């Protein structure tokens, strides 16, 4: 176990060893049956109807010897005894299906409307209208009554006219379909939806910038952060997999982005909040995409005041510089020239510095790269990613890598890395450590004070 004799990083190492390493069905009604004495009791049977028809309209008889036939009872077909409500033979229902006169029939038993009547609400399709027009024309001009002479010339003219009419009819139908599907004749609400989904500043450049910003937020921003965005940007983030519970839509009804941790400043939000967005709410830029009026900035929200945030950022930068210089004097840490310069300048994230100090207490470290700053970020934004290579002194590269990974995965927030990626194998393996944005300020000062 190694600790520095004096300085902020010695205290950090001691606390890191004590703190980080400790982390090792609807109801069906019954159908009522016909009551006694109803229409079913008086409905004439099929043989009675036949007998009535025979008596009312007797068949013509040819002269000849008459043979006595069966006597038909006139009482069964007497008009006085037959009910007036009895339907005609074609419309009379069977005794099992005849409904009660006091009860309305079911929709299945209700009679269909007459063929000549048509509901005003049922409009015929255009194809049916065109076919009817063509059929009537054919009947009137091409099909002639029997016995009428047809000259070959007139027949050829009518056939040609029929073909031309058919072509015109189908061309008109195709034109109707194309016009109805034309983007220029889209409904008004569709255009409104498109306008809501696109931020002001141009469709092409604005869409590209918003897509790039959405990808960066999904990969780099912490899932514990609350992201403030306009409705279109929030929809893009949610579609990309960012949790909807971590999104704070900002509209014209929103007085301020209070409660946000990160603000995705599109043209819509710049127009909504004006200069206050950068001067009052979110002074630091974590990443920027696009240019001109269509550019999109991902900003860190200042929880207190802008002067207080800038003072905390400056103090954090100074503490990082001091801690980086002390890590360069650790014999267990080897780094490339570029990484040594980043450590001396205080550009490396505080979470990485504390992690390096804790790892160096039990392992040799070989730091080959440090990065993680997005394009367009403000000055002072730290490098949140680093790459470790297998030390040359490691006799068992696999066991060394497993030990480092187990240590990193056992950490808790804010020292739990958001991403651990291994490329290569054996002695050529590279371990990449990533921390999410935004970087917390004052971690080194809190460790030193404790």
Image (cartoon, helix red, strand yellow):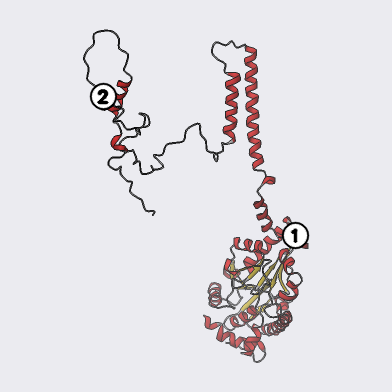
Most extreme residue toward the front, as rendered?
Answer: 80
Above or below residue 392? Residue 12 is: below
Name the residue carrying label 1: 201
User: Mark 1 against mark 2, which lies toward the viewer?
Assistant: 2
Is 333 on the left-hand or right-hand side of 291?
A: left
The N terminus - image quarter: bottom right
- Using the image as rendered, state which of residue 161 and residue 282 is in the foreground: 161
Q: Which secondary structure lies at badge 2?
A: loop
Query: Residue 165 bears which disc, if any?
Result: none
Q: Earlier in the sequence, mark 1 or mark 2?
A: 2
For the residues bearing labels 1 and 2, Cβ distance under 8 angstroms? no
Where's residue 31, x and y in %? 33, 46
Could you tell me how far apart the alpha carbons at marks 1 and 2 are, in whole angstroms? 94 Å
Where's residue 118, x and y in %? 52, 35
- Using the image as rendered, state which of residue 31 and residue 421 is in the foreground: 31
Is 25 on the left-hand or right-hand side of 216?
A: left
Most extreme residue toward the bottom, as rendered?
Answer: 5
Above or below residue 201? Residue 57 is: above
Name the residue carrying label 2: 74
Q: Quadrant of residue 194?
A: bottom right
Where's residue 359, x and y in %? 59, 80
Q: Quadrant of residue 418?
A: bottom right
The C terminus - image quarter: bottom right
Is 39 on the left-hand or right-hand side of 180?
A: left
Where's residue 77, x and y in %? 28, 26
Is 263 on the left-hand or right-hand side of 93?
A: right
Q: Is residue 374 visible?
A: no
Residue located 60% across and 60% down the image: 239
């Amino acid at each position: 176990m190694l600790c520095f004799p004096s300085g902020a990083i010695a205290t950090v190492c001691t606390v890191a060893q004590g703190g980080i390493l400790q982390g090792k069905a609807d109801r069906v009604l019954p159908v009522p049956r016909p009551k006694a004495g109803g229409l079913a009791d008086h409905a004439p049977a099929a043989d009675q109807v036949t007998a009535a028809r025979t008596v009312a309209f007797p068949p013509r008889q040819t002269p000849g010897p008459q043979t006595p036939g069966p006597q038909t009872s006139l009482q069964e077909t007497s008009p006085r005894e037959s009910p007036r409500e009895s339907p005609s033979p074609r419309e009379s229902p069977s005794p099992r299906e005849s409904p009660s006169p006091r009860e309305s029939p079911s929709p299945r038993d209700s009679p269909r409307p007459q063929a000549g009547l048509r509901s005003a609400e049922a409009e015929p399709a255009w194809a049916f209208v065109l076919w009817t027009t063509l059929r009537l024309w054919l009947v009137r001009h091409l099909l002639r009554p029997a016995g009428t002479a047809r000259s070959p010339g007139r027949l050829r003219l009518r056939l040609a006219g029929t073909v031309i009419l058919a072509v015109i009819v189908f061309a008109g139908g195709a034109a109707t379909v194309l016009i109805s599907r034309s983007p220029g004749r889209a409904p008004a609400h569709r255009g409104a939806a498109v306008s809501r989904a696109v931020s002001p500043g141009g469709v092409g450049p604005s869409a590209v910038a918003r897509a790039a910003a959405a990808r960066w937020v999904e990969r780099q921003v912490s899932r514990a952060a609350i992201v403030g965005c306009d409705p279109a940007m929030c929809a893009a983030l949610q579609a990309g997999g960012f949790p909807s519970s971590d999104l704070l839509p900002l509209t014209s009804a929103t007085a301020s982005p209070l409660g946000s941790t990160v603000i995705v400043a599109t043209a819509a939000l710049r127009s909504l909040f004006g200069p206050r967005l950068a001067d009052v709410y979110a002074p630091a830029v974590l990443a920027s995409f696009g240019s001109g009026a269509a550019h999109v900035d991902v900003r860190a929200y200042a929880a207190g005041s802008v002067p207080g945030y800038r003072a905390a950022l400056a103090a954090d930068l100074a503490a990082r510089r001091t801690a980086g210089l002390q890590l360069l004097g650790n014999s267990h840490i080897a780094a490339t020239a570029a990484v040594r310069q980043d450590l001396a300048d205080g550009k490396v994230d505080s979470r990485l510095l504390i992690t390096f100090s804790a790892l160096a207490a039990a392992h040799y470290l070989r730091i080959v790269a440090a990065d993680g700053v997005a394009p367009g970020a403000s000055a002072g934004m730290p490098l949140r990613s680093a790459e470790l290579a297998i030390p040359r002194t490691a006799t068992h590269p696999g066991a060394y890598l497993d030990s480092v990974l187990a240590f990193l995965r056992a950490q808790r927030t804010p020292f739990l890395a958001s991403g651990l990626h291994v490329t290569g194998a054996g002695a050529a393996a590279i371990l990449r450590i990533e921390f999410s944005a935004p970087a917390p300020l004052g971690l080194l000062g809190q460790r030193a004070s404790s």
